[in-house]
Amino acid sequence: MSNSLLPPSPTVRRGSTRRRAASNVPPMQDSHHGALQAIRSFLKGRICYDAFPISFRLIVLDTKLSVKRALQCLLMNSVVSAPLWNSDKSEFAGMLTVLDIIHLIQYYWRTSSYDSASEDVETLRLEKLREIEIELGVAQPPLLRKHPDNTLYEAAQVLVQTHARRLPLLDYDSDTGHEVIVSTLTQYRLLKFISINAKIQKLNLSLRRLKIGTYVANPSPNDVPEGQNPYHPIATATLNTTVFSVVHMFSELAISAVPIINEDGIVVNLYETVDVMTLVRSGSYQSLDLTISEALKQRSLDFPGVVICTASDSLGTLLQLIKKRRVHRLVVVEGEEEERKGGRKGRLLGIITLSDVLRYIMGAGTINETHEPRQTQTPAMSVPSSNVLASPANLTTPNA
Ligand code: AMP
């Protein structure tokens, strides 16, 4: 497989006096657009098999398994989702994801006590989860699938259109007549594959300009009348919020992380759906009454950290980071540029998830045509060894 995104080398016409037609597009933007087009063509020319890692493990869970054992299995194998198999019908039965666990918590909150929930989870089988979701009235996850021979472009389109974070890849065994679960293509895997193969350094326009992500609507949150969320539409919490309130936000807003801010709006941490999974693994649903501050103390020591960036960082820098490490979302904070306009360094400005990045790359984004200063190629996102959120544009592992 070729690892290059470069189009075939153009034939150089030596000695030609013909000049290229003048372009109205500034060079920086020209190169950015060119790189984007190259990525899309590349995805059309590669199939899902191409993006598979050299070696991988696939955990498939039988729908007869209890929720508790399934959770233990996910945690033991350090995965946050797994395809489900209906052994009665010998067919693929969808995915178990952390969102199912969030829904389960909501269900127990509405219908019974946490004590009985802990007992139920011992016996409740995965096949019952869909019924619970129907009873809760939450959207049923669509039964997505693609053949691994489909192009990455087609797979990416499905991910963008359905807002799914992963796409199960299924083949068909002609001997048995049954489906075969081959793998799952995650947003992360796809973006990492792009980052490895694309000329990402050419994606030099800033996140601000590309409008990738969700941003605070009010430019001066301090002036927002009391009782209103100054960081709307971003859902936020403080260290004193209970885990349970955050679980509600996850479920109601269909989001998977909530920035934790202090009274000045400075980002001090991020609480994610996977954190809830760690908390309920022991079946101790009482732990949902903990405050975020207490819950964060239970985070495993190998927690990879919260990634923060500023809106001046470029898409290329972001993809560079994805290439190097498993990143699922970044919190955007105010940087020097906002500070010059009366803002405050480190204050919450937005959130960018892999869905936002993929949506933009696949062509669902727009470019703000206003002029902006040239970006440096030095990544503004870095990895300090300290365990506090010392300054914006730093990637840290806060366990506050
Ligand atoms: P996700 O499903 O996590 O990729 O996020 C779906 C969409 O919600 C993306 O467009 C995010 O920018 C946005 N989003 C993520 N977290 C939050 C949050 N805490 N508040 C508001 N929007 C969010």
Image (tube, grey):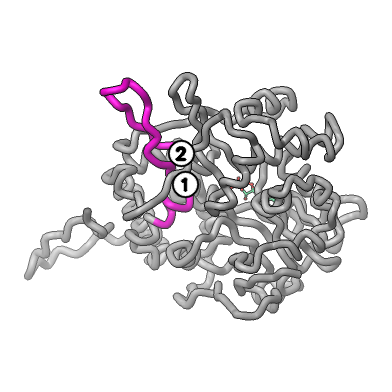
Residue drawn at x 82%, y 56% is 230
**In this picture, is 302 found above or below 89?**
below
Tag of residue 294: none
**In this picture, is 154 found above or below 175?**
below
Disc 1 within 8 angstroms of ligand 1 (CB): no
Residue 24 sits in quarter? bottom left
Tag of residue 167: 2
Tag of residue 186: 1
Q: Is residue 189 magenta?
A: yes
Q: Secondary structure at mark 2?
A: strand
Q: Secondary structure at mark 1?
A: strand
* Real-space Cα separation, disc 2 to disc 1, in angstroms: 6 Å
- Closer to the camera, 318 or 87? 87
Residue 304 sits in quarter? bottom right
Residue drawn at x 60%, y 80% is 385
Residue type at mark 1?
Answer: Thr
CB-based contact (under 8 Å), mark 2 and mark 1: yes
The segment highlighted magenta reads: 168-192
